[in-house]
Amino acid sequence: MIAITARQLREIKTPFYFYDVELLDKTLQLAVREAKRHDFHLHYALKANANPRLLEIIRERGLGADCVSGNEVEAAIKSGFPAGSIVYAGVGKSDEEIRLALQQEISCFNCESFPELEVINDIAGAMGKTARVSLRVNPNVDAHTHHYITTGVEENKFGFPVDDLEQAVNRCRELPNIEWTGLHFHVGSQITDTSVFRSLCERVNEIQRGIAARGLVPSRVNFGGGLGVDYDDPDARPVPDFAAYFQAFADSFERLPGQQVHFEPGRPVVAQCGSLVTRVLYVKEGKNKKFIILDAGMNDLIRPALYQARHRIENISALLDEPLEPYDVVGPVCESSDCFGKAVPLPVTTRRGDFFAIRSCGAYGEVMASRYNLRPIAPSRFSND
Ligand SMILES: *Cc1c(COP(=O)(O)O)cnc(C)c1O
């Protein structure tokens, strides 16, 4: 069940994103506590959700920021994240974005290619600055997640191939306006099998041993994000298991003396605190099935259409013990992929006007909304409003 009040349901026009800020804060407290145990640094990945109200809460708990665009760097600064806590990744940073990040004196660029290194060096030189750079390495570790959110195998566009790493570090050391700080990895998202993180550590140990043997010692290692959440049963596991996640790295990563270890969680911080609240427009009898047509569509929440993601769908107007039957739950957008779930068991009494909650929408929900079909952007509301 979501923490929304009858008054909020009455007063707000659907669809809207609803955020349980108490749950967000609880999640943050746990993540910070578990990271501190091992002296790990956290940078929240803004791309999961850059809602200013959420950013403020996240910043207050002391996380840094992980950005993938100039506008995200600006949003982080505007929300009060210290520049020294901001890291910036992405395969296609524009000159303007690099300039902005240098101007703001962010902590570090996570650099992904040789030509990018040259451009950062040139721009930093022209500005009379030194750019701190970590090299993003593609470790060729399969995250065993959906192929659209797998980023650490060789066919992906991300990072330097391991074979190029030594040359890349040497290039950093030659370039006068670049200071090499370390290594960066991010192998994928929604990873629920901790053995993937253990494999990543083993691979990183091997990579690190290889370059350390040549006197190239990274002062920081950043493991990116990727911890998954329970989309099937958000009430059973509202807070992801940060303890087991960080423990896997503490156990399996061979940390060098004085080395800083960083993480960039996005989804596990914000996914479970958000729901998309929507109403039933129509219950439609198809030929062999029944459809529930909602007033929220793929423009509001694209994850099911984009990555075949599953979200728990609840009729929050119905009584808990109603008999259930299967419905396809769809939106109003003119695309067959505008479908939130097939054969979802929902109350037989479901009717026009019922409120629905699509759960676990805090990450990659609101932030990916579009105006497709010229639909409006859904507003956001908060449990403490
Ligand atoms: C997307 C991304 C993250 C966040 O990933 P989550 O799975 O949401 O935790 C972290 N780092 C980088 C570089 C990313 O691209």
Image (cartoon, helix red, strand yellow):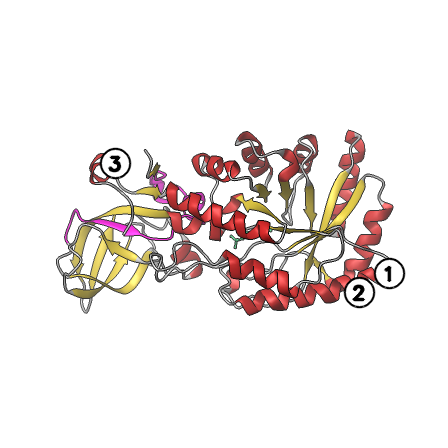
Camera-side mark, 1 or 3: 1
Dot 2 falls on a residue whose secondary structure is helix
Q: Which residue type carries mark 1?
A: Arg
The residues colored magenta run 351-378
Residue 86's image quarter? top right
Q: Is residue 53 visible?
A: yes
What residue appears at the point 81 percent right and 34 percent down from the top-left corner?
Answer: 125
Residue located farthest toward the front when viewing the structure as drawn? 37
Badge 1: few (under 14), some or many (20 or more) residues near its Cα, within 10 Å? few
Vertical placement of residue 86 versus 143, above or below: above
Residue 56 in percent (x, y) is at 48, 35
- Estimate the spatial distance between the alpha carbons at disc 2 and disc 1, rounded to whole Å: 7 Å
Disc 2 Cβ-to-ligand 1 distance below 8 Å: no
Sequence-wise, the earlier of marks 1 and 3 is 3
Camera-side mark, 3 or 2: 2
Dot 1 falls on a residue whose secondary structure is loop
Q: Which residue type carries mark 3?
A: Ile
Q: Which residue is mark 1?
A: 214
- Image quadrant for the C terminus? top left
Q: Which residue type carries mark 2?
A: Gly
Asked if labels 1 and 2 touch by Cβ distance under 8 angstroms, the answer is yes
